[in-house]
Amino acid sequence: MTIFVYSSDWHYKVSILEREDGWSLDLKKTKFPHTFVKHDETDKFIQPYKGESEIYLAFIDGIEAGQLQIELQPFSKSLRVWDIDIWPDFKRRGIGQAFMELCGRRATELDARRIVLEVQSSNSKAIAFYKAMGFKLIGMDASCYRNDDVERGEVRLEMAIHL
């Protein structure tokens, strides 16, 4: 099982305004009224929808410290980061950066045109990390997880690095 656990005091509040000539979208970093806590154990690491993924494990002093799951999606020439998880005791020790460097190498080797990933608008620490790694916002899904994602402050964001 993949266990997604994080807490956040901040999120990117999504506003969608329908106008006569289209829509306006706004994502503004906003403080949650109460700390948002995510604890989800519902997703198995290996799933058929994750295709022919490559799985990498990080170890520090012989102890498993994190995991990465990526897949080349040939139809879009994208390297999809399905999962990047660093165990709590090993955060802020360079593992995430090493995983992102590995993604860059694999993307080049596989002739991908970009690296893409999903992150929740409520996961402000992960968003800050991905931005520091060079990822840019490329899209969103305002009802991916539940019908009230916008109201709950947990909207699916897509981010990418174009190579």
Image (cartoon, helix red, strand yellow):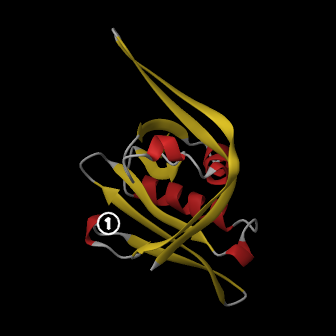
Residue drawn at x 58%, y 58% is 100
Left or right of residue 74, residue 147 in this image: right
Left or right of residue 160, residue 129 in this image: right
The reply to whether residue 162 is visible in this rendering is: no
Up-down relation of residue 93 to residue 81 (above or below): below
Report which quarter residue 73 is drawn in.
bottom left
Up-down relation of residue 99 to residue 36 (above or below): below
As drawn, the residue found furthest toward the bottom would be 62
As drawn, the residue found furthest toward the top would be 21
The reply to whether residue 136 is visible in this rendering is: yes
Residue nearest the observer in this picture, 17 or 66: 17
Up-down relation of residue 115 to residue 66 (above or below): above
Residue 84 place in picture, x, y as percent: 53, 65
Residue drawn at x 66%, y 36% is 29
Residue 94 place in picture, x, y as percent: 72, 65
Left or right of residue 22, residue 41 in this image: right
Residue 49 place in picture, x, y as percent: 27, 65
Residue nearest the observer in this picture, 112 or 65: 65
| Count of numbered tags | 1
State the residue position of label 1: 50
Q: How many neighbours does mark 1 have within 10 angstroms: few (below 14), some (14-19), or many (20 or more)?
A: some
The secondary structure type at the circle numbered 1 is helix
| Quadrant the N terminus occupies | bottom left
Residue nearest the observer in this picture, 151 or 73: 151
Residue drawn at x 67%, y 37% is 30
Residue 110 place in picture, x, y as percent: 37, 57
Up-down relation of residue 40 to residue 65 (above or below): above
Report which quarter residue 44 is drawn in.
bottom left
Q: Which amino acid lies under the numbered mark 1 shown in the image of this protein?
A: Lys
